[in-house]
């Protein structure tokens, strides 16, 4: 069972911050998941469209200049991280899942991510690119044939693996609410790794392990590690 820290160790520390990513690896997570926006001044690690919930700022992330974003308190005095700063926290051999919340230009996105990944020393084999927007993933797949794509979904559709096949995805990332044994078994049987979000209860972790899922996204990687030694 692979343990991905969802937005870092985000129960203990502010989500999507360098401190939360570092703590996740100190707690022996196998990888981190984080959310990204393609800001005009570079890729920013952040979950919401607006600054209101997780910072002391107000307004929209994308219309705020980077210099102003970097002044904000993202919790406990930490800053909103860039992609470069985030990838720098990932130790050798660990996994990294970049979830795309907003993409404006696929060409420049792929070019920036490829460059940042190469200079950070992260292994491309341990990089997953996911999004609920499968049109964006399709554009990325065409521009970057070897990268691992994770098809995110919160629904159990009538053809559950259709988009994953269309995207030549590596994995399916499915919501806990719909992660039935039938869904998981079908996805595995059709050749996809299966990751489930967001799994914080021990009972759910054990149930999903019995289904044979590949991994989970959890806000409590320390608890998950105590279950899966
Ligand atoms: O990538 C899994 C999960 O993070 C998707 O939902 O809203 O927590 O980004 P959300
Ligand atoms: Mg996410």
Image: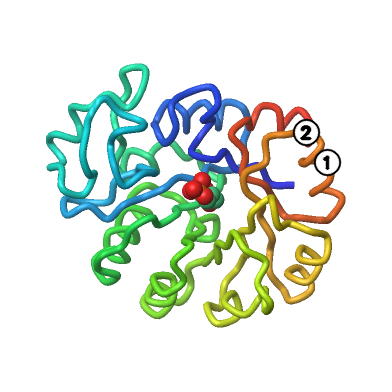
> Which quadrant would the C terminus be assigned to in this image?
top right
Quadrant in the rendering for residue 163: bottom right
Q: Is residue 180 above or below residue 168?
A: above
Q: Is residue 200 above or below residue 147?
A: above
Look at mark 1 in the image and give the residue it sits on. 206
Quarter residue 154 falls in: bottom right
Relative height, residue 176 to residue 10 (above, below): below
For the residues labelled 2 and 1, the Cα–Cα distance comes to 6 Å
Q: Which mark is residue 125?
A: none
Q: Residue at x 82, y 66 (%)?
A: 182
Residue 157 or residue 2, whichever sits in front = 157
- Residue 21 horizontal/vertical position (percent): 47, 33
Q: Which residue is mark 2?
A: 202
Task: Give the class, few, some or many, for how many residues have Cα within 10 Å of label 1's Cα (few <14, many ≥20).
Answer: some
Q: Which residue appears at 57% of the width and 43% of the height?
A: 31
- Using residue 225 as the reference point, say whether residue 152 is left or right of it: left
The structure residue drawn at horizontal position 84% and vertical position 45%, both measured from the top left corner, is 207
The answer to whether residue 31 of the structure is visible from this angle is: yes
On the question of residue 96 being in view, the answer is no
């Amino acid at each position: 069972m692979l343990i991905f820290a969802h937005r870092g160790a985000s129960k203990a520390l502010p989500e999507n911050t360098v401190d939360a990513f570092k703590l996740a690896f100190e707690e022996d997570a196998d990888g981190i998941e984080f959310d990204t926006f393609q800001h005009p001044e570079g890729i920013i690690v952040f979950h919401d469209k607006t600054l209101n919930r997780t910072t002391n700022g107000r307004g929209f992330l994308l219309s705020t200049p980077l210099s102003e974003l970097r002044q904000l308190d993202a919790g406990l005095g930490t800053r909103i991280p860039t992609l470069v700063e985030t990838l720098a926290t990932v130790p050798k051999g660990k996994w990294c899942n970049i979830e795309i919340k907003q993409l404006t230009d696929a060409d420049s996105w792929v070019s920036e991510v490829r460059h940042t990944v190469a200079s950070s020393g992260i292994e491309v084999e341990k990089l997953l690119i996911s999004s609920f927007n499968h049109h964006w993933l399709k554009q990325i797949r065409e521009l970057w044939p070897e990268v691992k794509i994770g098809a995110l979904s919160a629904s159990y559709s009538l053809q559950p693996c259709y988009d994953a096949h269309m995207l030549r995805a590596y994995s399916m990332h499915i919501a806990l609410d719909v992660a039935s044994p039938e869904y998981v078994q079908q996805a595995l049987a059709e050749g996809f790794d299966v990751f489930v979000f967001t799994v914080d209860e021990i009972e759910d972790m054990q149930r999903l392990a019995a289904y044979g899922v590949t991994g989970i996204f959890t806000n409590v990687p320390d608890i998950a590690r105590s279950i899966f030694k």
